[in-house]
């Protein structure tokens, strides 16, 4: 089965745009522009997976997560404020 993605959130937070896509297997992808240097990171705990690509200020960055909780972690790692993280996750459709 091939993976297909649909946009489940688009908005502007903390001075930059953010787009969240969800695949037909329940994985989330975050697309944004980085506003801080980030060395990236990845971890997996059972089926929960978070990956944040290394990036420099102003660079396009893509991250993936396998649950809403791990999506929140990815958004925090991308330096979104707590209010923005809550708003983004609450706004998923």
Image: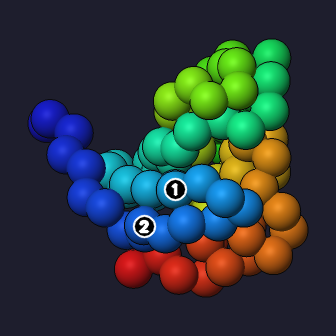
> In the orientation shown, which residue stands out farthest toward the right?
82
Relative horizontal placement of residue 60, taking residue 58 as reference (left or right): left
Relative horizontal placement of residue 57, taking residue 89 as reference (left or right): right
Give the quarter of the figure containing the C terminus.
bottom left
Relative horizontal placement of residue 26, taking residue 33 as reference (left or right): left
Kindly indicate whether the residue at mark 2 contacts the one at mark 1 (C-beta within 8 angstroms): yes
Residue at 57 percent of width and 25 percent of height: 59
**Can the viewer see residue 72 in this picture?**
no
Q: Foreground residue, 78 or 60?
A: 60
Which residue, given by chain and number where applicable, does mark 2 sit on? 10
Q: Is 41 located above or below residue 28 in the figure?
A: above
Mark 2 residue crowding within 10 angstroms, few (<14) / some (14–19) / many (20+): some
Residue 6 drawn at (x, y percent) = 25, 58
Q: Earlier in the sequence, mark 1 or mark 2?
A: 2
Residue at 44 percent of width and 56 percent of height: 19
**Can the viewer see residue 67 in this picture?**
yes
What mark, if any, has residue 4 been given in the picture?
none
Q: Is 80 located above or below residue 57 in the figure?
A: below
Residue 79 drawn at (x, y percent) = 80, 46
Residue 47 drawn at (x, y percent) = 62, 41
Judging from the image, what secondary structure is the residue with disc 2 in? strand
Which residue, given by chain and number where applicable, does mark 1 sit on? 18
Residue at 66 percent of width and 79 percent of height: 87
Q: Look at the image and name its color scheme.
A: rainbow
> In the orientation shown, which residue stands out farthest toward the left?
1
Q: Foreground residue, 57 or 64?
A: 57
Give the quarter of the figure containing the N terminus.
top left
The quarter holding residue 26 reads: bottom left
Q: Foreground residue, 30 or 24?
A: 30
């Amino acid at each position: 089965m091939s993976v297909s993605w649909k946009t489940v959130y688009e908005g502007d937070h903390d001075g930059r745009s953010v787009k969240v896509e969800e695949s037909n297997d329940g994985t989330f992808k975050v697309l944004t522009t980085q506003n801080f240097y980030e060395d990236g990171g990845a971890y997996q705990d059972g089926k929960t997976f978070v990956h944040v690509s290394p990036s420099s200020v102003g660079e396009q960055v893509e991250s993936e997560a396998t649950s809403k909780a791990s999506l929140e972690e990815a958004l925090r790692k991308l330096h979104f404020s707590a209010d923005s993280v809550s708003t983004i996750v609450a706004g998923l459709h």
